[in-house]
Image (tube, coloured by chain):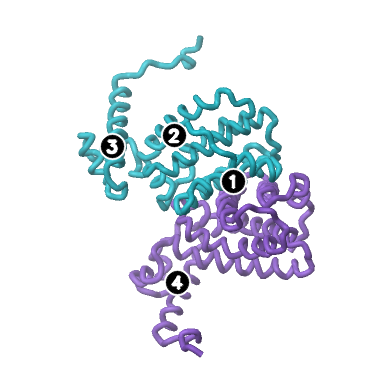
Chain colours: A purple, B cyan
Amino acid sequence: MSSTLVAQPETRTERKRRKTRDRLVSAAEKLMTSRPIDDVQIKHITETADIGHGTFYLHFKSKYDILVPIVRSRAVTWDHAIQQRVADMEDPAELMVFSGRHMSRLIQRDPIWRWFLKHAGVPVDEMRAAIGPFTARDFAQAVRAGRFNIPDAQFTSRFLFGAYVSSLLESFEASDPERVIDLMMELVLRVLGLDDHEAAEMAHCPLKPL
Amino acid sequence: MSSTLVAQPETRTERKRRKTRDRLVSAAEKLMTSRPIDDVQIKHITETADIGHGTFYLHFKSKYDILVPIVRSRAVTWDHAIQQRVADMEDPAELMVFSGRHMSRLIQRDPIWRWFLKHAGVPVDEMRAAIGPFTARDFAQAVRAGRFNIPDAQFTSRFLFGAYVSSLLESFEASDPERVIDLMMELVLRVLGLDDHEAAEMAHCPLKPL
């Protein structure tokens, strides 16, 4: 077996580096859940983590950058809860809709996610890295099952990513954010080739709680 | 007639202010079409316009901000050319597709528009101000004509805005950008309630030149 294919044990330097990074992320998350995110400065994060100010920039480019692992880890937790409720769903489209409606509601209610998405100057690539994996997995599953009818899976996913972020931002300002999320899901299903009637029915049916 | 309803003549101060702003915009456009946009600095713009450096910030917040009137004025010119070709189109959906396919091709080929859209840290509101009016007019016309079947016009337009920007960014990286633009239009038509077959046909039919 080629040694390049075997996971190398972490060196002492790598372990130290990872621990420093983890402490910065924990400190940032702690601060951001206890005060307005706009008020959290990088110096507060390094002080709370008890790490030198300059060290922050060895790990992250900006305050925005350190939000990426935080929002991802929250989404991983939510996704885990969602996955436990979909085991008995046979239709991959139904699974995607259930997952999308719940995940969007959780994002819409989370102050850190809201700040992350609303923050002017969002680097699109980092936003895709944070959101992409969850939508992509269920999407790919339904495409493989032939449940959707789309002309180009890669492009369709890029099209929907932009629509999704724009819709979430709209939901943040809406008097009825859940209605906006379900409308979004209805239009997503149209894009995926479901007819108008089925799209509306699936997106607006009563949503089983998590 | 109430005086508040009558356009007030421009005062001397206002005229002077507008002329300064116009000179800054012209200088920026001239520089940005003659060298890489990344290399154009605000001091180059004020030097070319022969205006004090600080004056720039009385009119614009940033180099990005001064791009908004430039990309808008280019889009106005293109839109004018497109409108001259659609006078005989009876179907508002056909008009929207023709306009969207051409406008997107022109944006995709324009270095200033590309920079504007690709620039990390795009303030979404300003981008909507630049793109919105053109898409909104044709869209509203087709909605009024009952050509589309959508659950909520305002939300649908916000959903499509995100999808549109994301798709244009994808076209910038594509080996065949026109194919990506037409795929985008196909998915837009699905969102608007056309069936898959009609959407594909309208989005990929041979495009009459401008």
Q: Is residue B194 above or below residue A78?
A: above
Q: Is residue B140 above or below residue B156?
A: above
Label 1 marks a residue whose chain is A
| Residue with the mark numbered 4 | A24
State yes or no: discs 1 and 2 in contact (Cβ < 8 Å).
Answer: no
**Nearest to N terminus: mark 3 or mark 2:** 3
Q: Secondary structure at mark 2?
A: helix
Q: CA distance from mark 3 to mark 2?
A: 17 Å
Q: Is residue B103 above or below residue A100?
A: above
Question: SS at mark 1?
Answer: helix
Identify the residue shown where x is 64% and y is 56%. A104
On whether disc 3 and disc 1 are found on a single subunit, the reply is no
Q: Which mark lies nearer to you, 3 or 1? A: 3
Q: Are marks 3 and 1 in contact (CB under 8 Å)?
A: no
Give residue A79's quadrant in the image.
bottom right
Question: Residue A64's spot in the image, x, y percent?
Answer: 45, 60
Q: Have a look at marks 1 and 4 and say if they share a chain.
A: yes
Alpha carbon distance from label 2 to label 4: 45 Å
Give the mark count: 4
The chain letter for the residue carrying disc 2 is B
Give how far apart the Cα atoms at labels 1 and 2 are.
25 Å
Whether residue B184 is visible to the viewer of this picture, yes or no, is: yes
The three-letter amino acid code for the residue at tag 3 is Lys
Three-letter code, disc 4: Leu
Residue at 54% x, 64% y is A71
Tags 3 and 4 both on a single chain: no
The image quadrant of residue B29 is: top left
How far apart are the alpha carbons under marks 3 and 1? 36 Å
Q: Which mark is residue B75?
A: 2
Residue sitting at 44 percent across and 41 percent down?
A: B107
